[in-house]
Image (spheres, rainbow, N blue to C red):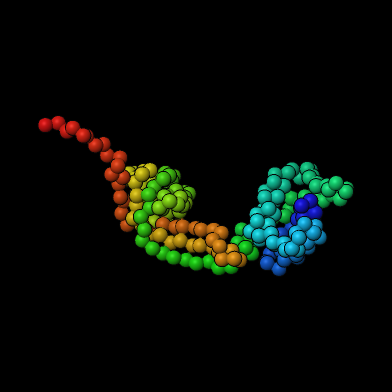
Amino acid sequence: MVQGKYSILRFLEENNTITCEADIIPLEGEIITLAEDTKLSQLNCYTPLKREHLISDLKNVTVATQQLAATDRATFCTNNGVCSVFNPKFDIPAEVAQQIISSETTENTATIILKVKKPDFLGESQWTFKFGNKTIDAKILDEEWLQDFCNRLFYIGPGDSIRAEVRSLAVYGKNYEVIDEKHSVLRVIEILPNNESKSVTLFPPN
């Protein structure tokens, strides 16, 4: 819907940031009003745009316009000649964006087994693990274990597993669907080598 896009761009043009939920509500109301004005639904029933999608769209525009040089300018014009200038100064702090789209955050700490998919050999970013059918990224906060790993006091690679104490944060949207998950390895208890990597001889020598 072109008018909806123009409303979003006009909002960006008139604002440099969003600080709370109240800042985004008028834009949501304007978009749903534009949808109702189309009269496309025979039942006159229109579903509001999901807030997380709206915030994501705003952030995507921000990322694109921040690449512009100081002398560059980008505009969006509708077929009827109405134009809006992209605002390269607009930005949403990550913590504000999460607060706006979330209704609740839960935290859980448990001892689980994670299979290593991609280690972080530099010790500065996140590891990638397999947990059941899920792939998760987690930063290892066990500094002593991590230092020993970086110093090559032991080896662990893809296919091996760790038994670890893991903290998981789940962020829920306004309809209580999970919209984000974060995981941290608080303590590595033990390394569980991948037994399948060991060669198997069907006909051992006598």
Find residue 132 and report its horizontal and vertical position in percent. Answer: 40, 52
Name the residue located 74 percent from the left edge and 43 percent from the top edge. 69
Find residue 118 and report its horizontal and vertical position in percent. Answer: 43, 44
Q: Is residue 150 left or right of residue 94?
A: left
User: Would residue 4 be visible to someone looking at this image?
Assistant: yes
> Compared to 78, does 104 lie above or below?
below
Find residue 133 and report its horizontal and vertical position in percent. Answer: 43, 51
Name the residue located 26 percent from the left edge and 36 percent from the top edge. 199
| Residue at far left of view | 206
Total marks shown come to 0
Out of 115 and 143, give the one closest to the viewer: 115
Out of 35 and 61, give the one closest to the viewer: 35
Q: Quadrant of residue 154?
A: top left
User: Would residue 143 be visible to someone looking at this image?
Assistant: no
Name the residue located 79 percent from the left edge and 44 percent from the top edge. 73
Out of 15 and 1, give the one closest to the viewer: 1
Find residue 167 and report its horizontal and vertical position in percent. Answer: 43, 61
| Residue at far right of view | 81
Name the residue located 72 percent from the left edge and 66 percent from the top edge. 25
> Compared to 78, does 34 lie above or below?
below
Q: Quadrant of residue 48?
A: bottom right
Q: Quadrant of the C terminus?
A: top left
Q: Quadrant of residue 71?
A: top right
